[in-house]
Image (cartoon, grey):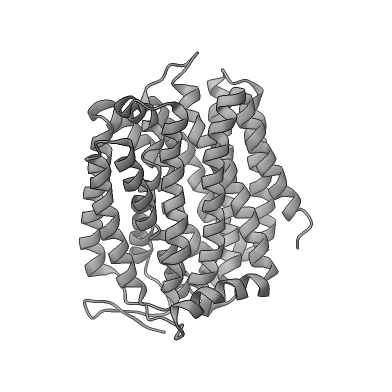
Amino acid sequence: MKQVMKTGMTINDTISSGMVSLMALTCGLVVANIYYNQPLLIQIAESFQLSNKQAGVIATITQVGYTLGLLFIVPLGDKTERRKLILIKIAGAAVFMLMAAASQSYAMMLIASLLIGFFSAVPQLLLPMAATLAPDESRGRIVGKVMSGLLIGILLSRTLSGFIGAQLGWRAVFVFGGIAMIVLLVVLNYRLPVDPPSFTGSYKELMQSLLTLVRQFPGLRQAAATGFLMFGAFSVFWTTLVFLLEGAPFYFKSDMVGMFGLIGACGALAAPIAGKSTDRKGPQFTIRLGVIAAVLAFATMGYDATSIIGLIIGVILLDIGMQVTHISNQSKVFALLPEARSRLNTVYISSSFAGGSIGSLVGTQAWSAYGWTGVCVTGTIFILTALIINIKSK
């Protein structure tokens, strides 16, 4: 297999370390678009005179947009050349990040947020590309490295957003994100390899094949359910953390809230390790380890809502658990049917981010009704259900 680059260069069966790094960086910068708003919800609420519930909808609608982009655009990675799709989506993300920065009403902010999510599903086109370029014996390791960029982006986006928001206001964060997308667009237009499609049917047949894949592979159904529950718990926590930390007894501002993303990024060190473990022992072993780590995280954070040390330990455990299960699940899914990796990834990631959207909504409701205890109980229910699904699997 050879992938021809726009510059005339070729990539053989092994993917270069430089390309892996560029893919990881791209994943991190693009996925950050979805999470920039979370440490800024209080500031945005003040700008548009919103309640906490209304502000929480901004985080939820962004993830809804991401899920829609996954479901309706990412499958085209098997039918349309992936490089072109990636460039189009990054250009769209740039436009709507700048629209969010210029928003003058709650309605305009919601529309911009929905479309930011929709055009930010780029990592789910890059990951199948990386899996296709990687040799079988090191696919888990390479996917893990690219995935570590995505997960670091999810976490550090909150740190960067919180810092910029505290110094320059929330609109500056979206301006920064829009400029970052424009820079990426230029770099990827030159560096990204061409990746020819493998599916020759119509778009309708492409979408119908998603249901066929779900029926055909029990492992895909299990991975999708696990992803739904794990991302749900992840969003339950991160959407509501800002409400806990900006209230009594902490009274932190957005920059300090964002620092928790930096703490959680320590868990990104688990990504390459999880990939290697998946290559050696199989994905199900590492999936169970990740779910157990997430259970311990919510138990630790729920023990004392006023303990910064408990929150820090919990954040690290939760992000390690999230990364380990996600990388292992994705490696398992990519191995099912190589020629359908974009569609398999669509099913898995769409389910995961549907869980994230529901987690954001349910987490906000749990916070409003029962405070931090309600948040931790809700997150634990999600995680324990994932554990039950995986405990007996081989």
- Give the quadrant of the N terminus: bottom left
> Is 357 drawn above or below residue 134 in the view shown?
above
Near-viewer residue (66 or 107): 107
- Give the quadrant of the C terminus: bottom right
- The single residue placed furthest to the top in the displayed view is 249
Total tally of numbered discs in the picture: 0
Q: Residue at x 53, y 33 (%)?
A: 364
> Is 36 drawn above or below residue 251 in the view shown?
below
Near-viewer residue (370 or 177): 370
Residue 303 located left or right of residue 12:
right
Q: Position of residue 164 (x, y in %)?
A: 28, 32
> Is 96 drawn above or below residue 298 in the view shown?
below
Q: Residue at x 57, y 49 (%)?
A: 355
Q: Residue at x 37, y 77 (%)?
A: 80
Residue 217 located left or right of residue 38:
right
Near-viewer residue (161 or 351): 351
Q: Position of residue 178 (x, y in %)?
A: 24, 48
Q: Position of residue 274 (x, y in %)?
A: 57, 55
Q: Quadrant of residue 279?
A: bottom right
Q: Quadrant of residue 183?
A: bottom left
Residue 241 located left or right of residue 161:
right
Q: Residue at x 61, y 75 (%)?
A: 212
Q: Position of residue 285 (x, y in %)?
A: 69, 57
